[in-house]
């Protein structure tokens, strides 16, 4: 991860122009800074190829529409901008972060008068967790913050406002010596981690919470496809925390974390070396690098 994100060499794409990295600034009276209405994406680049770029940019546009605004650029224009930026940054392994926000035409709640901006950054980001964490698996706290109901927040959008509780939950877990937090939803059901989706391995099948109040991750859907291609049963359903007792293994999925084994959720210990997790991680690694799923063992 970069240490000082504001001061790097290279270029960002901002509102249609390439600008030197340190000059990509916004005004402190930007509406989205005050009211958390920005929407963003994260895309991983493997061997110079941005995995599922089009899907991510479509989700960016959909997130903005859920918040009540339209991006001033089409998905195709943004996709071309990402490719041009990758070439300029000479990025082979890394991460792309597009973000859209409302500008400085209002400091009060109504936003209709605000101009919409879009910026894209691309930078190296080798691995979210170290090799040691990957081997031993993540230890997750159970967060005191709950994922809100879709009647309370635009839960299908990747908007900054929804990350306030995620950041608090993650920082509290890290301060307690744990790696991340599992968030329950407003009903008390299993939901997701602070930036990744959850899967349980139960008697040779995968069980994953129904994404009815949190992001239906692109990695989550990819893994469901890979598992079904392996002939595994995948069950999407509502699950109470007590169901963790039935699981032998668990893992998280997300663009940044990829497929990450879990060693514990609260008091429940799980097998981070479960065979199915390793198999799916291998299939995912092959897919994102354009090699297709590995053959059945
Ligand atoms: N949930 C949250 C809260 C996230 O931030 C992410 C990462 N974008 C995910 C789930 C996983 O989504 P994806 O697989 O599309 O990256």
Image: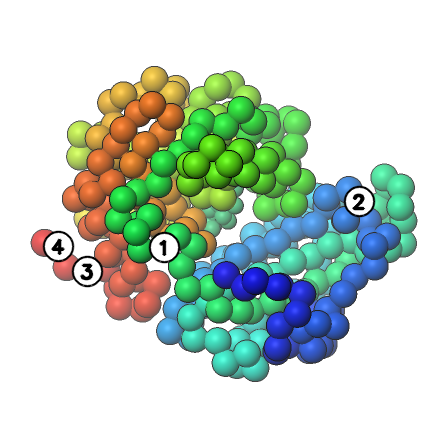
Residue highlighted by disc 1: 130
Residue highlighted by disc 2: 34
Q: Residues within 10 Å of mark 3 (few under 14, many from 20)?
A: some
Of tags 2 and 4, which is closer to the observer? 2
From mark 3 to mark 2, how far is it between C-alphas? 47 Å
Q: Residues within 10 Å of mark 4 (few under 14, many from 20)?
A: few
In the rendered image, residue 118, in percent from the top left (x then y), is placed at 70, 62
From mark 3 to mark 4, how far is it between C-alphas? 7 Å
Task: Tell me if residue 214 comes above or below residue 218 in the rendering.
Answer: above
Task: Tell me if residue 276 comes above or below residue 210 in the rendering.
Answer: below
**Left of 247 or right of it: where is 209?**
right
Quarter of the image with the C terminus in it: bottom left
Which picture quadrant has residue 269? top left
Question: Dot 1: what SS?
Answer: loop
Residue highlighted by disc 3: 294
Q: Residues within 10 Å of mark 1 (few under 14, many from 20)?
A: few
In the rendered image, residue 30, in percent from the top left (x then y), is placed at 82, 53
From mark 4 to mark 1, how far is it between C-alphas? 28 Å
- Which badge, 2 or 1, comes first in the chain's sequence? 2
From mark 2 to mark 1, how far is it between C-alphas? 34 Å
Task: Tell me if residue 72 comes above or below residue 92 in the rendering.
Answer: above
- Looking at this view, is 68 or 255 the one in front? 255
Which picture quadrant has residue 160? top right
Whether residues under marks 3 and 4 lie with C-beta atoms below 8 angstroms apart, the answer is no
Residue highlighted by disc 4: 296
Question: Dot 3: what SS?
Answer: loop
Whether residues under marks 2 and 1 lie with C-beta atoms below 8 angstroms apart, the answer is no
Whether residues under marks 1 and 3 lie with C-beta atoms below 8 angstroms apart, the answer is no
Of tags 1 and 3, which is closer to the observer? 1
Of tags 3 and 2, which is closer to the observer? 2
């Amino acid at each position: 991860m970069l240490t000082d994100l504001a001061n790097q060499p290279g270029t960002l794409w901002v509102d249609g122009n390439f600008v030197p990295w340190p000059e990509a600034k916004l005004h402190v009276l930007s509406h989205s800074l005050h009211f958390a209405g920005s929407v963003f994406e994260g895309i991983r680049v493997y061997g110079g190829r941005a995995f599922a770029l089009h899907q991510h940019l479509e989700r960016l546009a959909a997130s903005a529409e859920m918040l009540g605004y339209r991006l001033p650029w089409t998905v195709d224009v943004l996709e071309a901008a990402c490719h041009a930026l990758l070439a300029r940054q000479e990025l082979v392994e890394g991460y792309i972060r597009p973000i859209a926000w409302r500008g400085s035409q209002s400091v009060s709640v109504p936003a209709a008068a605000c101009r919409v901006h879009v910026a894209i950054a691309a930078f190296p980001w080798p691995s979210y967790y170290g090799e040691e964490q990957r081997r031993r698996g993540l230890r997750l706290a159970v967060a005191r913050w709950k994922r809100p109901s879709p009647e309370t927040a635009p839960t299908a959008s990747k908007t900054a406002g929804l990350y306030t509780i995620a950041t608090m939950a993650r920082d509290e877990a890290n301060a307690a010596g744990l790696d991340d937090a599992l968030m329950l939803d407003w009903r008390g059901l299993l939901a997701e981690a602070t930036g990744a989706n959850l899967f349980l391995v139960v008697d040779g099948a995968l069980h994953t919470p129904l994404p009815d109040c949190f992001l239906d991750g692109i990695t989550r859907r990819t893994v469901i496809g890979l598992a079904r291609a392996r002939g595994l049963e995948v069950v999407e359903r509502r699950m109470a925390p007590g169901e963790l007792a039935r699981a032998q293994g668990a893992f998280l999925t997300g663009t940044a974390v990829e497929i990450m084994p879990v060693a514990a959720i609260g008091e429940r210990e799980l097998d981070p070396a479960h065979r199915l997790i390793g198999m799916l991680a291998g299939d995912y690694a092959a897919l994102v690098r354009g090699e297709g799923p590995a053959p059945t063992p």
